Image (cartoon, coloured by chain):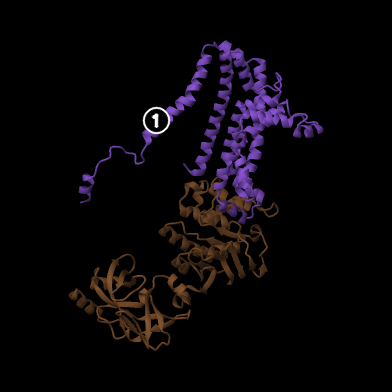
Amino acid sequence: MSIRVENISKRFGQFQALQPLTLEIPDGELVGLLGPSGSGKTTLLRIIAGLETADTGRILFHGQDVTNVHVRDRRVGFVFQHYALFRHMTVAQNVAFGLEVLPKAERPSAPEIHKRVANLLDMVQLGHLAKRFPSQLSGGQKQRVALARALAMQPQVLLLDEPFGALDAKVRKDLRRWLRSLHDELHFTSVFVTHDQEEALELSDKVVVMSAGKIEQVDSPQELYSRPESRFVFDFLGHINVLDAQVKGSRLQQGAAWVELPKAVTVPMAQLYLRPHEVHLQQTPVAHANLPLTINAVSLIGAEVRLELQPDGWQADEPWEIGISHAQYNAWQPMRGDRCYAVPDIGHLFMQGVTEPETLTWASTLIQDPNFPKRSAHLAEVS
Amino acid sequence: MSLAIASSLPQSPGKRVLPGFALSMGISLLFISLVLLLPITGLVVQTAGMTWQEYWFVVSDPRVVASYKVTLWAAFIASLFNGVVGLLLAWVLVRYEFPGKRIVDALMDLPFALPTAVAGITLSALFAQNGWYGSMLASIGVEVAYTPLGIIVAMSFTSLPFVVRTVQPVLEDLAPEDEEAGITMGGTDLTVFRRIIFPSLWPALLTGIALSFTRSLGEFGAIIFIAGNMPYISEVTSLMIFVRLQEYDYAGASAIASVVLMASLVLLFLINIWQAHYLRRIHGR
């Protein structure tokens, strides 16, 4: 079932939770509402569910206006962040609730309900816990019960409010994968709220980035990552290294740092955004950039080694972060206090007064130095 | 190296991290002994002078037995009534915003604050044949003052706050998500109340009703003014105790009091056991 949000706005007292916004969610898609807390994403989800009424605008399900349809008649599945399981009922009773409260004419017979509950619990791999009470389950199990309960009515729309927010990282990852496969299997339309960009990018067909009650960008994860339309989206999708500089012709300058742009720019001030993987480090500056940095911290967690770097002779609001491969790390052996130079390969230039960035590439340096180990050997000698 | 540091630190002899256990526990036990246990012991000692036959004779006196029946029935009906009305009042106070809410909330405690004798006199004035309520009720043929009905009115008045004040905090702590979950699954308001809200409130409500019941069993001041105190019809047990005291029959008074005490204790124990069982299921302990 497709969902259309039309000109929806919402105000809580003095606080404008949602500016009038419009959003189209096609049938069968898994859409993530991504934003920081207070961005209005949960309010939007609750308005779609009917748990909150909008001040203006309409909600359409499959082209049909449901704005004034009560929650209980909208037949959406809703999953709460803190599970909202009924504590005094067993797991099976929880899942059966939606079926048992159906009007008599639609209600399946007791054995039929029993069978469907058993099937649902098998689907969430909790068949063996049917007689337990929620307090005897772990967080991940509780959330799976909550999902089974929401799916018992076979809703065509599944809404999830920070469904994995209260779970630990490992369980979160498992559940995420599991939800994706469930979605692909059952083909309902899902909307989920999250403040975790990784979760949104991994799980969704489409991500809706929100801030301060507005939609910043709606795109597929790939598009969103490769073409963020605003500073906000950029900042929100992971760490960004920023050079805030004055423009002199085609050169960005701030203190000891400068970058030669591929072409001249007319504005007086600009910000160069560099993602951690779009920059590399070397021991000497290159012809198009001089960005001296001092290593602040080296962390070896994950697939790559992350270096935290402090600008040397210039300023940045936040320290820079650049990832290097383990191979590179082993060859170079960088230490806290070492000096090095950042070389931008791809950058995103935000010019004063323009919201959308301009993407720049420095073609000459894109090809990685084939003599890299040699260079790092040299580095090791120096240090 | 860390070991060296640890050994140079002052060693604490106890195992408890939170301080004050011995002192606070000691004071609590002393208080319980002086204020609760000692008077109860006194009660038992008073009756100790009696033989079982004498004891049985006093507590099974037909007039006293009639007072047990009146008291139990009246307390039962009054506490049930309070269960319904108290739940409603707590519900309104927690769930809705209205002007004067704080005043109404404060008024809930009035029956506790008012001397029970004052309450009794006020109630009997209101419910007497020529009183405001009494004259209206008389026109439809209902007599409250000087009948067992009056006892019920007095009992429910003085013990209403027990229900309101036990249900209120539980209602406040109820997660709105539970209700919302019930509604999204298609439950009607009544279903959601009956199957989701009420089971959560039930232990607190039952405690409130039980407290209200036991309080009513011992109520004296408010009742004697409105009850009429007709032997076998509208005499409550606490009045029987009072009558014995006036006759300087301390042992007899204590004997009857011990029956009331026993009934209250048994009831409270039963409620506590049941509640612990129910809550264990909910909290998984």
For the residue pair A114 and B215, the one nearer the viewer reads as B215
Q: Residue B145 placed where, x, y %?
A: 73, 28
Q: Which chain is brown?
A: A
Label count reads 1
For the residue pair B189 and B115, the one nearer the viewer reads as B115
Label 1 sits on what residue type? Gly
Residue A283 vs residue A154: left or right?
A: left
Dividing the picture into quadrants, the one containing residue A188 is bottom right
Q: Chain of mark 1?
A: B
Residue A338 makes an appearance in the image: yes
Residue with the most extreme left position: A381
Residue with the most extreme right position: B139
Q: Which chain is purple?
A: B
Residue at numbered disc 1 = B26
- Of helix, strand and loop, which one carries label 1? helix
Residue A2 makes an appearance in the image: no
Is B9 above or below relative to A291? above
Is A194 above or below relative to A146? below
Is A118 above or below relative to A351? above
Residue A323 vs residue A136: left or right?
A: left
Q: Residue A278 placed where, x, y %?
A: 36, 77
Is A215 above or below relative to B250? below
